[in-house]
Amino acid sequence: MGTGPSRLKSEILARERGKYPVFFFDFDGTLARIEETPGKVKFRPVARSIVEELARNYTVGIISGRALPEIKKLVGIRGIFYSGNHGVEIEGPGIRFVEKKSAGSVKFIDSLDARIRKRLKRYGAIIQPKKYSIAVHYRTVEPRLVRGLLDDLEAITGPALKAGKIKLQPGKKVVEIKAPVEWDKGKAVEKILRKTGRHGRVFFFGDDMTDEYGFQKVNEMKGVSVFIGSPERQTTAGYSLDSPAALIGELARFLFEAE
Ligand SMILES: [Mg+2]
C-alpha cells in the first residue's frame, strides 16, 4: 500500500484544470479519535476549522454510520453534504434522500429495540437507536462477555434475519441491525456526486469496514482512497495515514502551505 504525506498532497494538487476535487470523510476514527463510547467523541475545534476551510473552497461530504441529525450536530459545519446510517440518509445543498427500503423498515427496526435493550443491557453494551438501524456497541463490554452478547444478539435477531427482514453489519466493536438492503457509502458518494455535477478527483477517507465501499467507489473513479489508522485487516484503500490527527495535519498543509 502506498502511503506518505507528500504523495497525498501531490494527489490533491493533481487536479484537472477548472475541475475541483471533492472530499468525502467518515467521521469516527477518521476526523475524530475513537473514544470508549460514541457519546464521548468530540470534533476538536482545530479539526473543525480546517474542514470548514476546506469546505469554503471545495465540495465536502461527511458520510457517517451515526444517525443524520447526530452527525450534523457533531460536525457543525453548514452548507456541506451529510450522510447518516452509512449512506442510507443524505442531506445537503439540493438533496434530501432516504433509501426507500430503509425508510420502510423503520417500524420493524423500532420493534426490535426494546427486546435488544432488555437482553443486552446487562453486558454493559451501549444500544444506540438510529431510526433506520440499531447499533450495539460493545467496546465497554468485558472481553470475556463479548461472546455471550453476540450469541444473545443472534438469538434475538435470528428469526428476522432468516425471514429476510433485517441484516447485521459488523464494524469496530459494533454490530448494527439494519434493513436488508444493498446500499452503502459508495452509493451515497455516487448520489452526492450526481448533485455536484462537474468535478475533479474524488477523495474518500475512512477507517472502518463500511468505508471499504467508499474506497472501492472512488478507486473505480480513479480517485484517491485513504485509510486512517493502522490497518489490522485487508483494505482496498490506496493510501494510509496513521490517525485522525495525521489527516487533519495533511489537510492543513494542503490548505495553508504555499507551493
Ligand atoms: Mg469510522
Image (tube, rainbow, N blue to C red):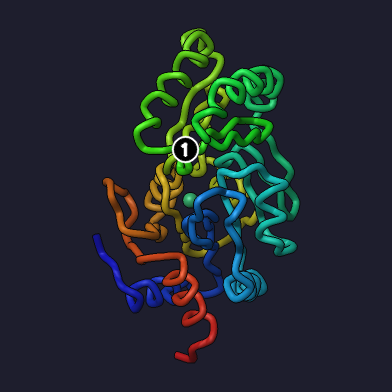
Q: Is residue 180 above or below residue 60?
A: above
Q: Is residue 221 left or right of residue 62?
A: left
Q: Residue at x 52, y 15 (%)?
A: 156
Q: Residue at x 60, y 44 (%)?
A: 66
Of 198 and 54, nearer the camera is 54
Q: Is residue 178 left or right of residue 150?
A: right
Please identify the quadrant where the N terminus is shown.
bottom left
Residue behind mark 1: 138
Mark 1 lies within 8 Å of ligand 1 (Cβ measured): no
Which percent across, then down, holds residue 18?
56, 73
Q: Residues within 10 Å of mark 1 (few under 14, many from 20)?
A: many
Q: Residue at x 48, y 42 (%)?
A: 140
Which percent across, then down, holds residue 14?
42, 74
Which percent across, then down, holds residue 153?
48, 21
Disc 1 marks a residue whose amino acid type is: Tyr
Quadrant of the rendered image containing residue 128: top right
